[in-house]
Amino acid sequence: MSNEVNAGKELPANAATLDAVFPDASLKLSDKFPNRVFLYERDGGALFAHTQYGDRSRVYARAKELAIGFVVTVGNYDYIYQWIFRQDGSFGFESELEGLILNKTVDDFACQLCEKETAEGPGTYLASGAQAFGTLVTPQILGVNHQHWINLRLDFDIDGPTNAVKEINTVPLPSSADKNPRGRAFTVATTVFGREQEARRDCNPATNRAWVIYNPAVKSQLGHFAGYEIKPLGNTVSCLPESRWGEETSFTQRHLWITKYHPEEIYAAGFYPNQAQRDYKDDLYHYSDDNENIYQDDVVAWYSLGVTHLTKPEDFPIMSGVVVGVDFKPDGFFSRSPATIHATAEVKP
């Protein structure tokens, strides 16, 4: 489903591309997939900067990022999938959603909710009829509400295959006259997962929730485990009800899953999700349902990244790109910031 992409067109002018090689129906290698994988360097904003009070000396560095990815068309949507590698040792996954929204014809010429709000003022309103399922994007054309879900299978081996996973949540500390009198202090609660079913987890912005994949046998001079943090950048909640828990779509109903490594467990929805029967078990829910040990073992992290798209007139006839992603940041992996080797110092008279 990949598309050919070219520098100076779909890609920046400085991009390089690589061909993909696949066997054709006769099992001979085909040359019909040119310019499928792209690589390019891009500006990443400020890597770091600081101005010292007093002499106004300044240290700074501009960030560069390496983007590696490919583009696919799935039905009416186009997706750019790319990995971003950075100079501070972090990396990230980004997907750009583009293409055509899913439309349906309706009888309506005007927005039903807008008419109610104009007539009745403040209050809570629900659309009815065809407009209950989307937004009128042009007369008699409705853009249908929908979700996109992407799952990343992440076979981490932090300083070796024997890893563990912990969850990090911020917790406010009690307020008292002598300690924390203004109620601003907080601490961190760490939960180490032992088995697969414990590690079916959701994002929680209220506690700044994140997860760390680490090697419990490798410590720094400071006593920190060598690890990498999974840091959500934004996500959504699955529209599927809990009554559908256990189906091949269940990977959308939790944001993080951790399983014991098995080489045949490759896809969150299995190899053949569109042909899944009622007893279908080649999916992430059933991989995790075995409830195997995941502490000090070879583990795989699965991250489900969702987008809820409530369409707008500006999405029609072709939508602008929407970027979603997740970051992976070193946590105890380095002894100091690897970004500082790029520093530029400036002293002002």
Image (cartoon, grey):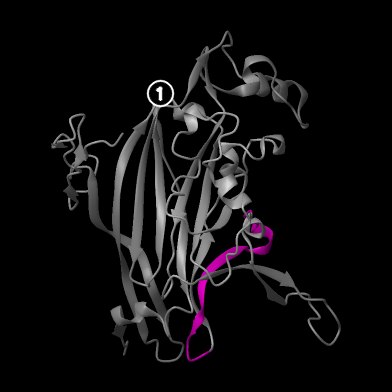
Q: Nearer the viewer, residue 312 or 233?
A: 233
Image height of 118 relative to 336, above or below: above
Tell me the kind of residue under disc 1.
Pro
Q: Is residue 103 left or right of residue 180?
A: left
In the rendered image, the residue lying farthest to the right is: 177
Please state the extent of the stretch shown in magenta in the rendering: 202-222
Give the image location of residue 156, x and y in percent.
44, 64
Residue ID at (51%, 58%) = 301
Residue 209 among magenta residues: yes
Give the image location of residue 177, x and y in percent.
86, 84
Q: Nearer the viewer, residue 306 or 321?
A: 306
Residue ID at (48%, 40%) = 270
Image height of 263 relative to 186, above or below: above
Residue ID at (53%, 83%) = 224
Q: Quadrant of residue 87?
A: bottom left
Image height of 296 relative to 103, above or below: below
Give the image location of residue 50, x and y in percent.
42, 80
Q: Quadrant of residue 171?
A: bottom right
Residue 247 among magenta residues: no
Give the image location of residue 211, x and y in percent.
57, 65
Q: Nearer the viewer, residue 211 or 302?
A: 302
Q: Quadrant of the C terminus?
A: bottom left
Image height of 338 relative to 15, above or below: below
- Looking at the rendered structure, the secondary structure element under dot 1 is loop
In the rendered image, the residue lying farthest to the top is: 107
Q: Quadrant of residue 161?
A: bottom left
Residue ID at (63%, 36%) = 239
Q: Residues within 10 Å of mark 1 (few under 14, many from 20)?
A: few
Q: Is residue 303 left or right of residue 87?
A: right
Residue that mark 1 sits on? 317
Count every numbered label the image shows and give the total.
1
